[in-house]
Image (cartoon, rainbow, N blue to C red):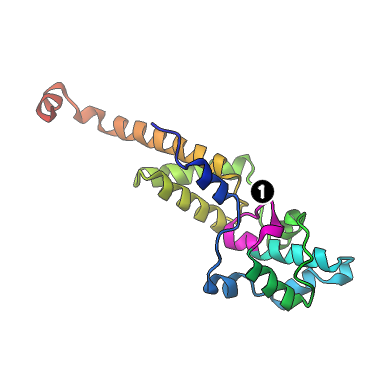
Amino acid sequence: MATQVFAAEELARLREFPEVSREELFRFFTLTSADIAFVAPGRGRGPEDQLGLAVALCTLPWLGFVPDKVAAAPPVVVARLADQLKVDASQIRTAHLHLVAQYLSWQSAGAMELKELDEFLLARAMEHDSPTLLFRLGCEYLISARVIRPGPDTVVRRVVHAREQAQRETYDRLAHELTPQRCAELD
């Protein structure tokens, strides 16, 4: 079974910010009063920290992960958040994922979370064989479980493994039906 699910360019895109739709902009990038209090300057945060933290805060529920280059967030996102925080949109920093994950009650993908993802993917692979669909479903599962998505390479490896397991399990379930006579008929 091929392990190449995405081309190198597609994998690179999966690590970055995608385009944001108008609906997503308002749904995910509108700060609540609690969010504004969380990023408030009263906690010793300057404008660049506030904006970087706000981008990470809104991106995690949107994508299920925060791209390494927070400063590469879509300009419309940065402008919207800067306006809500009343800070300069040109000021942004990136090292805020841990604080945001803790505030939003998200967790890193540890061994237990990855095991649960594997079980989820195996169940879906028994129903679907499309690796891109399984990747998308796995990402949606991680978001619903509030688990920060590991790198796309990790998720792809798990999709490939789930597809291989599903193929073996399907064969095991059908092996008793494949008598020599039936195989001859099928041939």
Q: Which residue does the image show at 60% across and 49% down from the upper left? A: 15
Viewer-nearest residue: 131 or 13 = 13
Pinpoint residue 79: horizontal percent, then vertical percent.
69, 73
Q: Position of residue 11 (x, y in %)?
A: 53, 45
- Is residue 102 found left or right of 178 in the rendered image? right
**Residue shown at 50% from the left, 47% from the top:** 10
Q: Is residue 80 left or right of residue 88?
A: left
Q: Quadrant of residue 111?
A: top right
SS at circle 1? loop
Q: In the drawing, does residue 62 fall left or right of residue 68?
A: left
* Quarter residue 144 falls in: bottom right
Pointer 1: residues within 10 angstroms few (<14), some, or many (20+)?
A: some
Whether residue 15 is in magenta: the answer is no
Classify 136 as above or below 31: above
Q: Is residue 96 left or right of residue 25?
A: right
Residue 34: quarter of image: bottom right
Magenta part of the chain: 59-73
Q: Amino acid at mark 1?
A: Ser
Q: Is residue 32 above or below residue 144?
A: below
Q: Residue furthest top?
A: 180
Looking at this view, is 108 or 4 the one in front?
A: 4
- The quarter of the picture where the C terminus appears is top left
Viewer-closest of 46 and 179: 46
Residue 178 image point, x, y percent:
19, 27
**Residue 167 sits above or below residue 87 on the image:** above
The quadrant of the rendering that contains the N terminus is: top left
The number of numbered discs placed on residues in the rendered structure image is: 1
Expressed as whole percent of the image width and height from the top left, the position of residue 162 reads 44, 38
Q: Which residue bears the numbered disc 1?
A: 108
Q: Residue at x 78, y 69 (%)?
A: 38
